[in-house]
Amino acid sequence: MKPVVALVGRPNVGKSTLFNRITKSRDAIVADFAGLTRDRHYGDARLGSREFIVIDTGGFEPDKPSGVVAEMAKQTKQAVAEADAVVFVVDMRNGVSGQDHDIARYLRQCNKRVFLAVNKAEGMADSPLLAEFHELGIGEPHPISSAHGQGIRSLLEAVLETF
Ligand code: GDP
Ligand code: MG
């Protein structure tokens, strides 16, 4: 069985960009504004000879009455339930937000292996701002740049090492 890795996080942190990097596909819709991806999205990925499946989350139907926050929470929960490991994506340029704390609280009690990816870290991988993300209680922050393809191999090695 291929391990399943879910990408979760609040809108606009770069989950779909990371998904496209990892799967090398253009399948997930990347938007300049939050939430264009319509539903969870599955992709095949490999690192060396290791194959795995990635789940993108964060899409929502714009006219759903439940609203963005509820829909995001629902998709996150479904993807986490399906996953063997979770990559929690946050935004280095934005810092830690209240929504990040809400998601972190959920992830800390889900009994899955969770890895913290601090995206948009191009040119900032050595910044002291990175240490701020320890407060989420998810462990060591991995600086990455999905847009520039930096730090992703080492993040995935950490994730796949546990299988
Ligand atoms: P999602 O809502 O979490 O799926 O985020 P998207 O993948 O749609 O990206 C949201 C925005 O962040 C887009 O404008 C991306 O181009 C931008 N973005 C994604 N990754 C990076 C990155 O590594 N660095 C920078 N500077 N911008 C990024
Ligand atoms: Mg997206």
Image: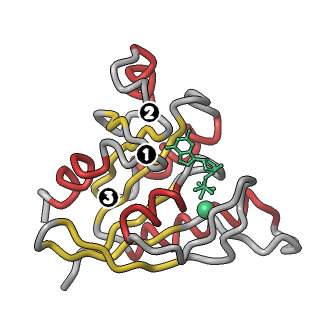
Disc 3 from disc 2: Cα separation = 31 Å
- Ligand 2, what quadrant? bottom right
Name the residue carrying label 3: 111
Residue at 44% across, 72% down? 55
Mark sitting earlier along the chain (3/2): 3
x, y percent for residue 26: 52, 73
Which residue type does callout 3 highlight? Answer: Asn
3D distance between C-alphas at marks 3 and 1: 31 Å
Q: Earlier in the sequence, mark 3 or mark 1?
A: 3
Q: Residues within 10 Å of mark 2 (few under 14, many from 20)?
A: some
User: What amino acid type should be assigned to the residue bearing mark 1?
Assistant: His
Relative side of 15 to 80, left or right: right
How many residues crowd around disc 1 within 10 Å: few (fewer than 14), some, or many (20 or more)? Answer: some
The residue pinned by badge 1 equals 148
- Ligand 1 lies under 8 Å from the Cβ of mark 1: yes
Q: Helix, strand, or loop for circle 2?
A: loop
Looking at the rendered structure, the kind of residue marked 2 is Glu
- Could you tell me which quadrant the N terminus lies in? bottom left
**Image: 3 above or below 139:** below
Task: Locate the C terminus and report the quarter of the image it occupies.
Answer: bottom left
Answer with mark 2 or mark 1, whichever residue precedes in sequence: 2
Look at the numbered disc 1 and give the secondary structure of its residue. loop
Q: What is the C-alpha distance between the residues marked 2 and 1?
A: 7 Å
What residue is drawn where x is 84% and y is 74%? 64
Q: Are marks 2 and 1 in contact (CB under 8 Å)?
A: yes
Residue displayed at 65% across by 52% down: 11
Is 79 displayed left or right of 111 in the figure? right
